[in-house]
Structures are given as structure tokens and as C-alpha cells.
Image (spheres, helix red, strand yellow):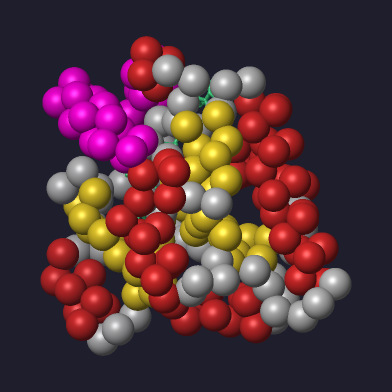
Amino acid sequence: MRGSLFVVSGPSGVGKGTVLRRVLERLPHARKSVSVTTREPGPREVPGDEYFFVEEDEFQRRLASGEFLEWAGVHGHRYGTPAAWVDDQLAAGTDVVLEIDVQGGRQVREKRPDGCLVFLSPPSMEELERRIRGRGRDDEAEIERRLNVARRELDFAPDYDHNVVNDELESAVEQVVEILRRRREGEAGK
Ligand code: ADP
Ligand code: 5GP
């Protein structure tokens, strides 16, 4: 049985990383793809953990050689999903989750119409701002930029297969786990 491909999108700070970490702890047959980015690593970020960090020319080279399943410019930096790793995992029967932005979500929808798209929304913009500040990673200009982008990203939620509001963490985790489980059980029944 092939694995299924999932996309999880939502504004920066909504809790994608937090929710997915817990979801993946419960689903041993699912893994998250590690993206390549031109963004600088934050002080607590380990290369190869959440991202592979590369220079702009290296990103360009990989893009030109067709390495990315999808890619996008987000907050002034570039991010891409390595296609080979994703396809190896799917072929081995592992479910793959892409934590990517809405531009990437659209590309996956076109290229992989069997993919399942999940949008994570904040309970309110005020709460989103609190979470971005609470994370303590971004300076004031970056926070403003992320909040402005967030307002536009929320418009894409209706294009997704599932919408989950990350209000109470455990409830959001449970909803995403169920979405992945149902899809896997559906595939197994085919
Ligand atoms: P993203 O990956 O979407 O940028 P993070 O996972 O880094 O977001 O979460 C941003 C901040 O919000 C973190 O400090 C995290 O602990 C907090 N957070 C995540 N989910 C919730 C929640 N349901 N309730 C309160 N705080 C949350
Ligand atoms: P951050 O820099 O906060 O980790 O991520 C910023 C945004 O980039 C988030 O919305 C995240 O989902 C998105 N992102 C991360 N990796 C990728 C990727 O490989 N492709 C696309 N399209 N977006 C990504």
C-alpha cells in the first residue's frame, strides 16, 4: 500500500509545528518532510531538524535541476520540498506531511490531486499575534510582516479539504490525527 500525501498550511505562529509534532508522535507510519530554505536559522534551530539551510545560489541550483515538488517565496525567503524523499517514503508506505504555505498547497493540489490538504486557523488575530510574540523568535518588523501575510493566507482556507481551528491544542491535535487515520483506513480498504 502506498502512503498518502498531506499538506498542512496556516499562518506563521498558528501552531503548525506544535500540533504536527504531537500528531506524528501518535502516528508511527507518518513523517514530516524537511524543507530546504534560504532563511537564516534561528538561535535554537538545528540544521536538518526542521529545515536544511542553504545559500540563495544553492537553492537556485536545486530548483533548476527540478529537485523540488513545490517551492515558494515566503516572508522574503525561499522554501522548497525535496521531491525524491517524499516519493521514496510514499512508495515505502509511509504517509508524508508537508508543512508548507498556501502557494505550495496550490502547487501540490495541481501536481498531486490525490493529496489531502489541511488548513490550520488561529482562533483570532489577537491570539495569533500573542503566539508569534510568545515564540520570541522574530523582531518587530518580522512580526508585522508575518501578521500582514497571515491576513491574506486565511483567505485560502476554503480551498482546503479540511479546516481545523487550533484553539485548544489537544483538540486540534486529535482532529488532525483523525484526518490522517481516516485517509489511511480508506486507502487500506481500496
Ligand atoms: P508555526 O509552526 O505555525 O509557526 P508554532 O508551532 O511555532 O507555530 O507555535 C507558535 C507558538 O504558539 C508557540 O509558542 C506554541 O507553543 C504556541 N501554541 C501552539 N499551539 C497553541 C495552542 N493551541 N494554544 C496556545 N499556544 C499554542
Ligand atoms: P518559518 O520561517 O516560520 O519556519 O516558515 C514560514 C512559512 O514557510 C510557513 O508558512 C511554512 O509553512 C512555509 N514553508 C516552510 N517550508 C516550506 C516549503 O517547503 N514550501 C513552501 N511552499 N512553504 C514552506
Measured from the top left, where is residue 87 in percent x and y? 54, 80
Q: Is residue 76 left or right of residue 188?
A: left
Measured from the top left, where is residue 11 in percent x and y? 37, 36
Residue segment shown in magenta: 129-155
| Number of residue marks | 0
Q: Quadrant of the C terminus?
A: bottom right
The residue lying toward the viewer, choosing from 137 and 12, is 12
Quadrant in the picture for residue 148: top left
Quadrant in the picture for residue 135: top left
- Magenta residue check for 141: yes
Measured from the top left, where is residue 56 in percent x and y? 16, 64
Query: Looking at the picture, does residue 177 appear above or below residue 28?
Result: above
Asked whether residue 43 appears in the rendered view, the answer is no
- Looking at the image, which residue is at 70% across and 54% down? 180
Q: Residue furthest right?
A: 189
Q: Is residue 154 left or right of residue 55?
A: right
Query: Looking at the picture, does residue 11 appear above or below residue 171?
Result: below
- Looking at the image, which residue is at 77% across and 80% down? 1
Q: Magenta stretch mostly in which secondary structure?
A: helix
Q: Is residue 74 left or right of residue 154?
A: left
Quadrant in the picture for residue 106: bottom left
Asked whether residue 14 appears in the rendered view, the answer is yes
- Looking at the image, which residue is at 24% across and 49% down? 74
Measured from the top left, where is residue 188 in percent x and y? 82, 72
- Magenta residue check for 111: no
